[in-house]
Structure formats: structure tokens, C-alpha cells
Image (cartoon, rainbow, N blue to C red):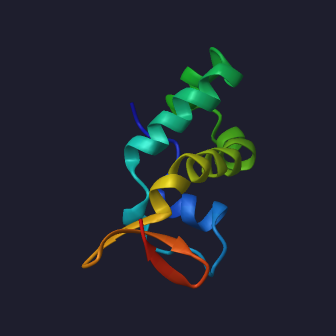
Amino acid sequence: MRNLITPGEVIALAFATTEITDPALIAETTITVAQERFLRPALGHLYDAVQAGKYPGLLRDYLRMPLAIYVKFLEMPNLALRIGNMGIARHESEHLKPA
């Protein structure tokens, strides 16, 4: 199974330029989960055709943006936490506060 979008495309489509910019923060497995959880039920049998590379216009024009937003939705809890020399911390305003 191939992913329909890359982590770089997720960042370019779903995040503002002032938000995260490192594609390594977006897990490939999260993209796969978003595809299976949100796109497959909506598209039904058409999902397999899109997965096989058919209908590139449909993917490019209509599916990539919502898929990127679904991935962002699934990744937000992970992106809110950072591991550093103080242990696990969560973002709070402009500062980090120990969890």
C-alpha cells in the first residue's frame, strides 16, 4: 500500500508557514491511518482505483488537501509534546511547561 501524500505535502498544504516545517515530524503511518480512516469509507471502491494510480486529477485537485488536514488532525497531540533535557514538555503559549 502506498501513501497518497508525502509528509512534505502535508506540511505544505495543512500547516501555516509559521508552524512546523520538518517533514520528519509527520509519520508515514499517520498518513496511512488517515487514508484508511477517512478516505476509504468516503470513496468506497473508488479508493482502490485512486490507490492504484488511476484518477490523478481527482487525487491532486480534491483529495490531497482534505487528506493533509486529516493527517494534521491525527498528528496534533504528538506535535504538542516535545522531549527535551527537562523531560516531556507541552507547548503553552510562547514557553514550554513541564508536563
Q: Quadrant of residue 19?
A: bottom right
> Residue shown at 63%/41% (left/top)?
56
The quadrant the C terminus occupies is: bottom left
In the image as oriented, which residue stretches furthest toward the left? 85
> Residue shown at 45%/55% (left/top)?
78
- Relative side of 31 to 60, left or right: left
> Residue shown at 48%/34% (left/top)?
33
- Relative side of 70 to 89, left or right: right
- Relative side of 65 to 99, left or right: right
> Residue shown at 24%/79% (left/top)?
85
In the figure, 69 relative to 88: above or below?
above
The quadrant the N terminus occupies is: top left
* 15, 55: nearer the viewer: 15
User: What percent of the width, then of the height, locates residue 9?
Assistant: 55, 60
* 99, 8: nearer the viewer: 99
- Relative side of 9 to 39, left or right: left
User: What percent of the width, then of the height, locates residue 20?
Assistant: 52, 73
Q: Quadrant of residue 83?
A: bottom left
In the figure, 51 relative to 16: above or below?
above
User: What percent of the width, then of the height, locates residue 31?
Assistant: 48, 43
User: What percent of the width, then of the height, locates residue 67?
Assistant: 63, 44
In the image as oriented, which residue stretches furthest toward the front? 98
* 79, 15: nearer the viewer: 79
